[in-house]
Amino acid sequence: MQRHDDPNPFDEEPVNPFAKQSDSSSKPRFPGLSSLPFGFGNRNDATDDIPLGSVNGSKGKDLASWEADLKRREQDIKRREEALTSAGVPVEEKNWPPFFPIIHHDIAKEIPIHAQRLQYLAFASWLGICLCLGWNIIAVVVCWIKGGGVKIFLLACIYALLGVPLSYVLWYRPLYRAMRTDSAVKFGWFFLLYMIHIGFCIIAAIAPPIVFHGKSLTGILAAIDTFSDHALVGVSNNP
């Protein structure tokens, strides 16, 4: 039996967990764990002290700088337009056609009154050539369906895709500027190129059998040639 005067081995340390411990007992019991690295992959690279507001703040600064750059460019464009207007240089704003403006066209305001009638006739002539080239595609498609071949259809598309913008740039626009500025040089450029335009219209109206028997153009000879085989194709080829 154990004597009552023997020292109790459990009396060496206080049992009360709320008792104040000495400085030596405040040290961690497993000192090796404090030296182990923490983080993903046993690396001490955890960065949990980055504020989320800094990321949003950087995006806000980028948007603000981008908006400021756009405003600065708009102001530069306005200053240039005002400088051109004050210098007497007209600023051409695209306003035609109304549903999808691609060119600047305003006869009533920019062309003198005595020349407006002639300018309107020229504009009607340009619209007429555009409609004729569009109708040429439709007629050639009918001829293609009846066995005319795909080459004449491709040529008709080339005529339309090149004829409409080239006729505007080469002769109608020079006439418009010549009427507005009364420039002799621009009038001479218009007359030279308009003669070429008239020559093309004469060839298209006759449609001689030069390229693919003339069937890529809806001319008189092409209509006569195809009328005997297909009446519908001949009628569509008749200008």
Image (tube, helix red, strand yellow):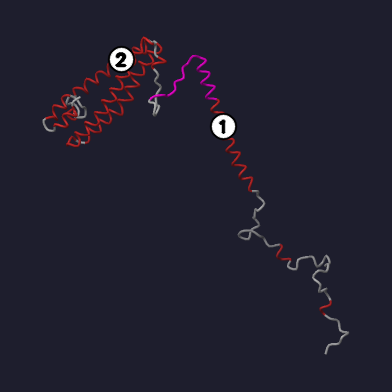
Q: Mark 2 points at which residue?
A: 192
Q: How crowded is mark 2: few (under 14 residues within 10 Å), some or many (20 or more)?
A: few
Amino acid type, callout 2:
Leu
Is 88 contained in the magenta span?
Answer: yes
Q: Where is residue 99 in the image (x, y as percent from the top left)?
A: 39, 29
Residue at the location (22% across, 34% down)?
141
Q: Position of residue 174 (x, y in %)?
A: 36, 17
Q: Find residue 41 and name its label.
A: none
Mark 1 → mark 2, Cα distance in angstroms: 47 Å
Q: In which quarter of the image is residue 157?
A: top left
Mark closer to the observer (1, 2) = 1
Is 83 situated left or right of 27 in this image? left
Say which element carries label 2.
helix
Q: In which quarter of the image is residue 30?
A: bottom right
**The N terminus, quarter of image:** bottom right
First-in-chain label (1 vs 2): 1
Q: Mark 1 points at which residue?
A: 69
